[in-house]
Amino acid sequence: MRPLSRPSMSKARRARIWDRDGGVCYLCGVKVALEEDWDVEHRIPWALSFDDSDENLAVAHKAGCHAEKTKGDVKRIAKAKRQAGETGQQKRRREKGGSIPSRPFHKGQKRAWPKRKLR
Ligand SMILES: [Zn+2]
C-alpha cells in the first residue's frame, strides 16, 4: 500500500543531508548562504517515487530553485504517469549521473516459455 502523505523531516535528518551535500543546492550547484532558506528536497518527487531514503534527498534553495522545480515536477508527474516505463530507482540512478549496474538483457538467451504446439 502506498503511504498517503509525505513523511516528516526531522532536524537531525536535515542536518545529516546538509553535511553529506556540503550545503550545496543540488539544483543549481551553488552553496546555500547562511541567510538563505533551504529545504531538503526529494530528487525524484515523492509523488512519483515514494522514496524517502537519504539517497533521494538533497539540499535545495527554498526560494527559486525548489519553487521552480516543484512547478516542473507537476508536469513531470503527469508525464511519468502517462509513460510509466522506467522505475523510480533507475531514474534516480540516472539523474545522479551514477552508473546503472549492468544487467544482462537476455541476449541470445532462449525463451523460457515452451513453443506453442500447432494443431
Ligand atoms: Zn539553488
Image (cartoon, rainbow, N blue to C red):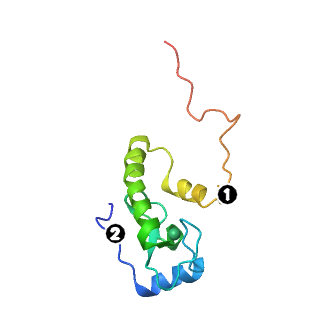
Mark 1 — residue? Answer: 99
88 w.r.t. 118: above or below: below
Residue most extreme to the right: 108
Q: CA distance from mark 2 to mark 1?
A: 28 Å
As rendered, which of 1 and 4 lies closer to the eye?
4
Q: Position of residue 91 (x, y in %)?
A: 54, 54
Badge 1: residue crowd in 10 Å (few <14, some 14–19, many ≥20): few
Q: Position of residue 59 (x, y in %)?
A: 51, 74
Name the amino acid type tagged 1: Ser
Name the amino acid type tagged 2: Arg
Badge 2: residue crowd in 10 Å (few <14, some 14–19, many ≥20): few
Q: Position of residue 7 (x, y in %)?
A: 35, 73
Which numbered marker is on residue 6? 2
Q: Are marks 2 and 1 in contact (CB under 8 Å)?
A: no
Q: Position of residue 32 (x, y in %)?
A: 53, 78
The kind of secondary structure element at disc 2 is loop
The kind of secondary structure element at disc 1 is loop
| Quarter of the rendering occupied by the N terminus | bottom left
Answer with left or right where residue 13 lies relative to residue 107: left
Which residue is drawn at the image coordinates 42% and 54% (left, top)?
A: 72
Which residue is drawn at the image coordinates 38% and 57% (left, top)?
A: 71
Answer with left or right where residue 24 lies relative to residue 110: left
Which residue is drawn at the image coordinates 41% and 55% (left, top)?
A: 73
Label 2 vs 1, first from the N-terminus:
2
As rendered, which of 21 and 53 lies closer to the eye?
21
Which numbered marker is on residue 13? none
Which residue is drawn at the image coordinates 45% and 70% (left, top)?
A: 41
